[in-house]
Image: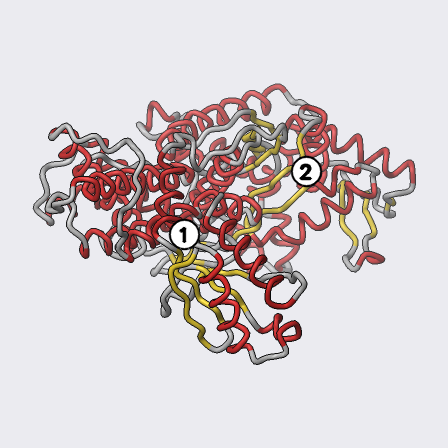
Amino acid sequence: MTPDDLLKEALESAVVGLFGKSADLQIQPTNPQFEGSHTLVCFPLTKLSGKSPEETGKLIGEAVLKGSDTVSSFNVVKGFLNFVLSDKVWSSRFNQINANPSFGTFSPNGKEIMVEYSSPNTNKPLHLGHLRNNFLGFAVAEIYRAIGYKVHRVQIINDRGIHICKSMAAWKLFGNAETPASASVKGDHLVGKYYVLFDRHYKEQTAELEKSGLAKEQAEKEAPIMKLAVAMLQQWENRDPEILQLWQTMNGWVYEGFGKTYERMGVSFDKLYYESETYLLGKEEVLKGLESGVFFKKEDGSVWVDLTADGLDQKVLLRSDGTSVYMTQDIGTAILRFRDFPSIDGQVYTVGNEQEYHFKVLFLILKKLGFKWAEKCFHLSYGMVDLPTGKMKSREGTVVDADDLMEEMVQAAAKQSQELGKAEPSEATNEMIGLGALKYFLLKVDPKKRMLFDPNESIQMQGNTAPFIQYTHARIRALIRKAEEQNLNFSGSFSGIKLEPGERALISLISRYPETITLAASGYSPSVVANYAYELAKEYNQFYQTVRIFGEQDNQTLLFRIALSAQTAKIIRHAMALLGIGCPEKM
């Protein structure tokens, strides 16, 4: 039994013995300001006791202390009954954990879940926002895998549409047959260059047309470069061979570039979906919905859905020229995924919170089309990432490029090691520290919150950062190597050891690791795991500063402290791996 179970059993027995009936017991972690690890909230029990919360707490505490060896002492603070569990309980719990090589992982539960993340456009390279998206989606997938799910990692690649044609139009006008090889740049960067170039010329042409007397809206439609992009989109949908060839070539450049970026990020996918392949299914379903009366057609021939009765508005699904919109493609993609994986218990869309309305509409449309699984779809909404220098703008070319930022973080890790006078770390270690700092900083914040990414703060060796956690792990691993060099056997069980407060705190925190993973999964929030890892590293450092390890004279206590340290390192390593972060053996 866990300490929680033992205490609950003792409390239930005490309450029945005192008051003659059982009650719902509210047990929570003790406030760090007070002694203890578990707290019983006494206010709801005053009806049973007929006494004040403080008196009720004292009665229950004395009864538990007298009737069980689970508790060594208690204190009551304003109706909160705080328990200090006995060393016997904590030692027994540690022995259970230490003897279980799979502690922190769950057996397969027979359930499946699909997690979508990344889902970029093929008209520009990945940027800082994509980093948060990828790290978040990948971590959610890892957390669900840890609690026993079979996980399908997917992305929808937005490889068609007017935005793609903008890059194609600019390349056709100004490219002079330039290729990634001839320009010596990654393909996604080259295509992104032409996306920015399109926007610059588009603004210039629009301004000239406005000067000639056209209204702004008309000028934007009449700009020659925009008309070329629109024509290309129509030609693409009509399967024009020349346009298809250009589209395939430029997308191929982008995919090769994306592949290198994903490899360095440390993320992967089990299946790729392409908008160019799913939008036709979406159009088919929209036309079926039109026939059945779910949707309606306007005079210009465009197809719409009316969601005003559901508190939303009207949404276009097919333009008047018959071309698709994002919603059309997303309808097709959702349907195809549930056809491909009919056993999935849910589909998670990792997409920024600016798309919240879009997904409300999507899930409602799918429900109206009669797909019961629409209720299994969840939008993992996350906030934007800001920088000390301000917002990012893709069209203006002021985006913080993902490749550049990852390289800068790795270089910052190498520089910091030199400044601290550490031994020259390997390139692999610098990579692990630099990218770990980036991932952790983006994941430690609740996904729903908008955040400010500060590269300098993220790489620091102190505070709530990956390097601090990684250094704690490396410190423990050095300790373990020393123990192994001395042929110390710390793999057994331990009993009769008088525990220090720091040791009890560590065992308590380690004991809560499985429920931490479950909590993170239920909230789709890797930040729960990230902050747990930080708390565990912080707790270990306090323990390390207050007790002796190799200076300990009692052999059993020495071996116990080494075993406790090894288990702490194991949990830190496992928790960080769920976030896609490695922990070096040496730092």
- Residue 389: in sight, yes or no? yes
Local secondary structure at mark 2: helix
Q: Which residue is drawn at 40% across and 43% down?
A: 93
State the image coordinates of residue 555 (x, y, percent, origin top left): 16, 40
Compared across the picture, whether 188 is left or right of 238 comes to left
Tell me the quarter of the picture where residue 566 sits: top left
Q: Residue at x 19, y 57 (%)?
A: 546
Q: Residue at x 66, y 28 (%)?
A: 235
Mark drawn on residue 330: 2
Disc 2 marks which amino acid?
Asp
Residue 29 lies, with reference to residue 142, above or below; the image says: below
- Colour scheme in use: secondary structure
Residue 281 lies, with reference to residue 11, above or below; the image says: above
Q: How many marks?
A: 2
Residue lying at the far bottom in this picture: please name it: 52
Q: Distance between the residues labelled 2 and 1?
A: 30 Å
Number of residues whose C-alpha sits closer than 10 Å to that of mark 2, classed few (under 14), some (14–19) or many (20 or more): many
Compared across the picture, whether 5 is left or right of 369 comes to left
State the image coordinates of residue 203 (x, y, percent, origin top left): 50, 52
Q: Which of 407 and 394 is in front in this view?
A: 407
Q: Mark 1 points at which residue?
A: 444
Local secondary structure at mark 1: loop
Number of residues whose C-alpha sits closer than 10 Å to that of mark 1, classed few (under 14), some (14–19) or many (20 or more): many
State the image coordinates of residue 452 (x, y, percent, origin top left): 39, 59
- Residue 169: in sight, yes or no? no
